Image (cartoon, grey):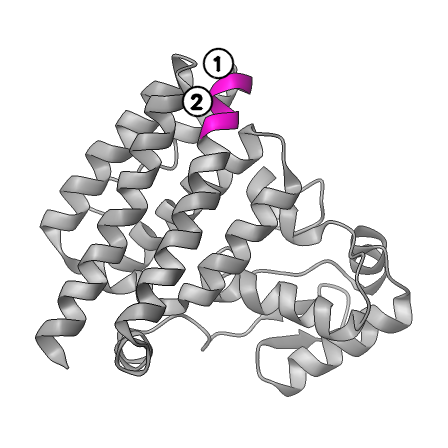
Amino acid sequence: MLLTPQGASRSLAAVFTPIKSRGLVDEVCGRIEQAVETGLLTSGQRLPNETELAAALGVSAVTAREALSQLRTAGIIRTVRGRSGGSFIADDVLPSRERALDQLRELTRLQISDLGLHYQAIAAACASVAARRSDAADLATLRSFIPTAEEDPLHWRLALSEFLLEVAAIARSARLARELIRLQADLGTLTLLPCSDSDYCATTTNLLHEAAAAIEAHQPPAAEAAVKALVAATTDWLLTEQSKRY
């Protein structure tokens, strides 16, 4: 799929909204790197071309070109020349369990808890607003992101990420969606680890259904509570795993 603002999902579209800060090349690179780290952009997906990327992000074509060059040098994207060419996410940038375990070892319990609390606060705010603004079409899309038991850990992690970003999209807040993306990137590949645990997956599936039902019923407190519990399940799992291993 060509990832223009028109071709992207609403949650992924948050990646390609105008940049208002300075240090523009770094900001463009950061947006793409965060989307890759959270699984929103996956190996082989095509990026907008320089002109489209510049227009979507509100930067000059020169800035977009330099950012793509830096991403290429870093091995995050590859460029194919020719008529059907373009810039694509590289084939070897998928999150890995080994990188996730390295990150788990490097973080302190306080850092994990702090990230979890921040993520919980933003996600809960999104859920509360979404419960006030949702319609039937929103819920059909939201439920499509609830993973099934057959999903592998990578797809499960992406589905959880997309579910929460879709909640932010239902809240009609690109700012909240971008903050969720940033927090998911800060958590990095850590969120891949619990997705191999069947008990965790069963718990989160129930919580996803609860959150969707509360948003559909326009019950902000229930939606907020379900999403808080969802994030807490991830944080608690990571803290427990860290205490077992290190």
Give the tally of numbered discs: 2
Q: Quadrant of residue 31?
A: bottom right
**Position in image of residue 62 (x %, y %):** 90, 73
Task: List the residue tagged with mark 1.
Answer: 136
- Mark 1, Cα crowd under 10 Å, few <14 / some 14-19 / many 20+, is few
Viewed as shown, does residue 153 lie left or right of 134? left
Residue 244, above or below 10: below
Residue at 81%, 56% in the rendered image: 20
Residue at 57%, 52% in the rendered image: 179
Residue at 27%, 28% in the rendered image: 209
- Mark 2, Cα crowd under 10 Å, few <14 / some 14-19 / many 20+, is few
SS class, disc 2: helix
In terms of secondary structure, what is the magenta stretch mainly?
Answer: helix
Viewed as shown, does residue 214 lie left or right of 35? left
Residue at mark 2 to residue at mark 1: CA–CA distance: 7 Å
Q: In the rendered structure, are the residues bearing label 2 and label 1 in contact, judged by CB atoms less than 8 Å apart?
A: yes
Task: List the residue tagged with mark 2.
Answer: 140
Residue 175 in view of the camera: yes
Residue at 46%, 21% in the rendered image: 131
**Position in image of residue 172 (x %, y %):** 62, 30
